[in-house]
Image (cartoon, rainbow, N blue to C red):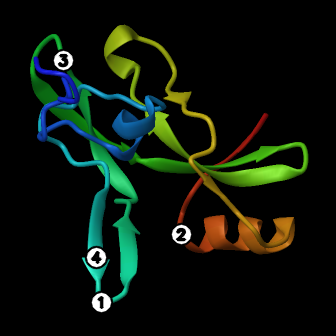
């Protein structure tokens, strides 16, 4: 690898790869898409993804891709991380999108979009 090259393949690259905050091994499953629309950057997150067992290579039931997180006075969205293939409960990333409204609006947004809320 030459200086300045990334070790991350385009098939698994995510926003976090640029800053080192999030990495997943879901083969070519896309967790978000980033595109330019006129003069805006648009980031789309799927609400649901399929669980994936890396040991068998098989996909399972659908799960929430995102969850709402409330940590003291901070709230926003985080990724859910499938751990069912290890017989464990799901894990969650730190907040990747911070909500800049009030808490009641955030809770209503989560409810309208079927996002569970995790209190930390």
The Cα–Cα distance between marks 1 and 4, rounded to whole angstroms, is 6 Å
Q: Residue furthest bottom?
A: 38
Image location (x, y in percent) of residue 55: 16, 10
Q: Are marks 1 and 4 in contact (CB under 8 Å)?
A: yes
Residue at label 4?
36
Q: Nearer the viewer, mark 2 or mark 4?
A: 4
Residue drawn at x 17%, y 29% as measured from the top left? 5
Q: Residues within 10 Å of mark 1 (few under 14, many from 20)?
A: few
Q: Are marks 2 and 4 in contact (CB under 8 Å)?
A: no
Image location (x, y in percent) of residue 94: 62, 35
* First of labels 3, 2 by sequence position: 3
Q: Are marks 3 and 4 in contact (CB under 8 Å)?
A: no
Residue at label 1?
38
Quadrant position of the N terminus in the picture: top left
The Cα–Cα distance between marks 1 and 2, rounded to whole angstroms, is 26 Å
Query: Residue 14 sits in which quadrant?
Result: top left
Residue drawn at x 9%, y 21% as measured from the top left? 57
């Amino acid at each position: 690898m030459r200086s300045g090259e990334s070790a991350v393949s385009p098939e698994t690259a995510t926003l976090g790869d640029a800053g080192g905050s999030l990495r997943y091994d879901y083969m070519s499953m896309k967790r978000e898409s980033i595109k330019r629309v006129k003069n805006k950057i648009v980031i789309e997150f799927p609400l649901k993804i399929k669980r994936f067992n890396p040991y068998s290579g098989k996909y399972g039931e659908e799960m929430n891709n995102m969850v709402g997180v409330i940590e003291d006075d901070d709230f926003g969205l985080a990724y859910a991380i499938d751990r069912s293939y290890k017989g464990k409960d799901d894990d969650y990333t730190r907040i990747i999108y911070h909500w800049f409204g009030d808490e009641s609006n955030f809770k209503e947004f989560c409810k309208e979009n079927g996002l569970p809320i995790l209190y930390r």
